[in-house]
Amino acid sequence: MTARESSVHELPIGRRVAYWRGRRSMSQQQFADAIGKSKSWVDKVERGVRRLDKLSSLQAVADGLRVDLRLLLSKETKREASSDELLGRANIDEVRAVLVRWGPVQLWPDHSVPTLGDLAKAVDHAWLACQHAKYLDLIRSLPKLLCGAQQVRTADPAAPEAVQRLAEAYQIASIVLSKADINDLAWVAADRALAASQNADDQLLVGACAAQLGRVLLAQGQARLAMEIGIALAHRIVPSGPLDAPADALSVYGTLLLVAARGAAGLGHADSVADLLDRAGRAAAIIGDGQDHYRTVFGPVTVALARVVATIELDPGVLDLVVHQRLVNATAFRRLPPSIGLPTCLTRRTGSCRWAT
């Protein structure tokens, strides 16, 4: 978030609406048409004459501006809603303590060091819970999972699977914390996952962890960094040339390209977006839908979703609602796990789009 955007939080809500309307290059009349209100209504809201005190009105305004509803509210409201209401301060503090701890790992109370087999089962179960969007259960179990993974890694540092499972545990933690909008901790967890993966002798795991770091960077407004990471790692996994790599490599490669495309869209680089999505599309066509290599769920439908998001980010007036409706009615779309981040425009016919968390 830029310094200017940070200062917007200090403005009255009407002024914030006017700011974001200007950022979207919309006149008051265009904005009014987008949300089904009159120009007079918009003018009164922006001048503070009319109050925005109904959740339905706030959501309609946020949709029309293509911003998260919380951007129209104060920082304090956002923070309380994301941590205290959803997860509970105690759970967040426990996760924070495990993530930032260095040095010898202390045993979890009343528990011995888990075996590598037990850790593998726990990580696989956590992935399943993550895919089914059971985030509240996960946030409660994350401290024990992370502590156990750290203990196993310390007890058997030469075991490649111990490093792999530690990286996966951090990756899961980053995903869950991102969903809860705890982006500072999500960044720490993603960075730890990437660092751990580099000791696992598995370039595809490194790429999968880098993709998660890229998503966290996007959530933090660091579009350029996300684009650079996505492109660099994708080229390392599948160098320029024919796409004759295995399906798992193509899945991670394509996922990194989608992260890079979202970053390019955030920067307004339309040509780069088109190139990145085309390359991801060629990889997806080889793999097909219904795959989940390295927990990426990469395939033609995820590329299609990325195209929708990029299109609206670059030019919200060109979304083809017929194509959009065909996409959401497709079997491949309905089979996606609940955890995957989906653009909210796919469930609303407002012409607005944000990537859901």
Image (tube, rainbow, N blue to C red):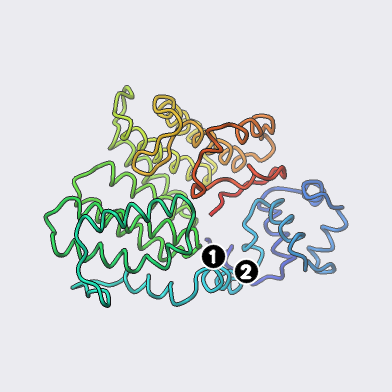
**Depicted 152 relative to depicted 271: above or below:** below
* Residue displayed at 80% across by 52% down: 28
Q: Position of residue 75 (x, y in %)?
A: 58, 71
Of residues 57 and 130, the one nearer the viewer is 130
Query: Number of numbered discs present?
Result: 2
**Mark 2 or 1: the one toward you:** 2
Q: Which residue is mark 2?
A: 9
Residue 325 pos. (x, y %): 66, 33
Mark 2 and mark 1 in contact? Answer it, CB < 8 Å: no
Is residue 342 left or right of 192 when viewed as pictured? right
Viewed as shown, does residue 45 lie left or right of 273?
Answer: right
Tag 1: amino acid: Ala
For residue 55, what is the image quadrant?
bottom right
- Residue 343 pos. (x, y %): 58, 45
Image coords of residue 269 (percent x, y): 52, 39
Would you name the residue on which mark 1 appears?
A: 3
Indicate left or right for 102 with 311 as reference.
left
Relative depth, front residue between 165 and 211:
165
Where disc 2 sits, the SS reads loop
Q: CA distance from mark 2 to mark 1?
A: 10 Å
For image coordinates 69% across by 30% down, the residue present is 322
Residue 74 appears left or right of 298 = right
Residue 316, labelled with which disc? none
**Residue name at image x 32 percent, y 22 percent:** 242
Q: Residue at x 73, y 59 (%)?
A: 18
Q: Amino acid at mark 2?
A: His
**Viewer-proximal residue, 216 or 27?**
216
Q: Residues within 10 Å of mark 1 (few under 14, many from 20)?
A: few
24 vs 106: above or below: above
